[in-house]
Image (spheres, helix red, strand yellow):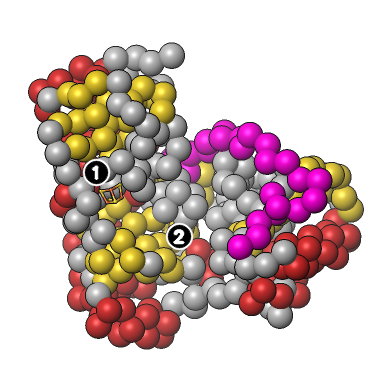
Amino acid sequence: MQTGDGLLARLRIKGGRISPAQLARIAALAAEHGNGLIEITARGNLQVRGLTPASAAPFARATDALVKIERGLVVETPPLAGDDPTEIDDPRPLAASIRAAATLLSARLGPKVTVIVDGNGRLNLTALKADIRLTAIGSSQWACSVGGRSDVILRNDALMITLRHLRQIADLGLAARATDLAGSAATPHRTRSISPIGILPLRDTTATGIALPFGSSDHAALTALADAATHHGITEFRLAPHHGLLAIGAPPAFAAEAAALGFVTASDDPRIRISACIGSDGCASGHIPARVVAARLAPYLAPETSLHVSGCTKGCAHPRRADVTLVGQPDGYGLVISGMAGDTPQALLRADQLESAAAHRQG
Ligand code: SF4
């Protein structure tokens, strides 16, 4: 994808599983072929920024040789699927069946069409949007939600029903989504946020969840994190929603090292409630260095308040409402309360007024 700071590559890594050595190598490739910034998105995908038309192909070849990349229909499962003792059912076999059965269909579906297959455990995917959502609710019962409609179905019928809905979407053309199906109504999206930060018990071990501050890290910090993981005998990370990275079987000392490297390791870290794009530090459209501003304001952010610092009105980092949105403008910072970056600001602030705007409790 073309963005304001060059080409962006989003990597759908199979199962979201990546070793410390692979993570370090991707960090090195991001520095060699891109601008050295690596992101984990709100959906838990890895992104590399600042590629050029000349560097994108060698980057793609190198990553293809390094990790298994998923192609075709997007079928997502929670990052701890199969290992989470709280999940009602292991969603992976059903997800694999849907992926395999939809192979021929995927060319007729738009690239954003997404199926979520959720075992309904602690780190479930409730907060993520999907065209078709299958959620385990009992030993053989699943909820199937399509374009705003929800039905209880039998586990054994889930594959057939999902394929039928996918065919219906495909028949409407490449731009179609589930909300275009007859009888569908877009319902307000549930936004219950489930933090991946902290120690998560698994069936056989634990996972230590950390997050990239504002969803982004430079290659040096990520390489240092991978080195620390290797030092502690960690062999696997899993990419997680909400910009998370789960270190499987990590000892307590790992979280302390990750914190020292600048990663988010505490669930009460205010940076979890802040979204910020690269802004003028890497995007031609940016009027302010949004992440630098966000880091400065984090200690002042009022409790339970969400903040979006956006380099411009496009609002890439958080295309939704936030309690407080600060939007870079040529002559200052637009202040939007309970709105989006593209909304008309209620006030234009100077740099020295930002701390008090962040500290003002909303709602
Ligand atoms: S919101 Fe940020 S990343 Fe998006 S175009 Fe504006 S400055 Fe660039």
- Mark 2 lies on residue: 45
- Residue at the spot x=79%, y=43% of the render? 150
Looking at the image, residue 270 sits to the left or right of residue 41; the answer is: left
* Type of the residue with mark 1: Gly
Horizontal placement of 322 versus 98: left or right? Answer: left
Does the magenta run of residues contain 196?
A: yes
Above or below 25: residue 223: above
Query: As drawn, is 342 to the left or to the right of 223?
Result: right
Is residue 155 among what the camera can see? yes
What type is the residue that disc 2 sits on?
Asn
Residue 215 at x, y = what percent?
34, 49
Q: Which numbered circle lies on residue 355?
A: none
What x and y, as percent, mark residue 236? 44, 64
| Image coordinates for residue 249, horizontal then vertical, percent | 46, 56
Counting other residues with Cα less than 10 Å from the Cα at mark 1, is it few (<14), some (14-19), or many (20 or more)?
many
Residue 261 in sight in this render: no
Residue in view at x 65 percent, y 60 percent:
176
Say if 174 sits above or below 202 in the image: below
Residue 305 vertical placement versus 141 (above, below): above
Residue found at x 76% / y 53%: 181
The residue to which callout 1 is attached is 311
Quadrant of the rendered image containing residue 45: bottom left
Image quadrant in which the N terminus is located:
bottom left
Tell me: is circle 1 under 8 Å from ligand 1. Answer: yes
Decide whether residue 243 is among the magenta residues.
no
Is disc 1 in contact with disc 2, using a CB cutoff of under 8 Å? no
What stretch of residues is rendered in magenta?
A: 175-199
Dot 2 crowding, Cα within 10 Å, few <14, some 14–19, many 20+:
some
Disc 2 element: loop
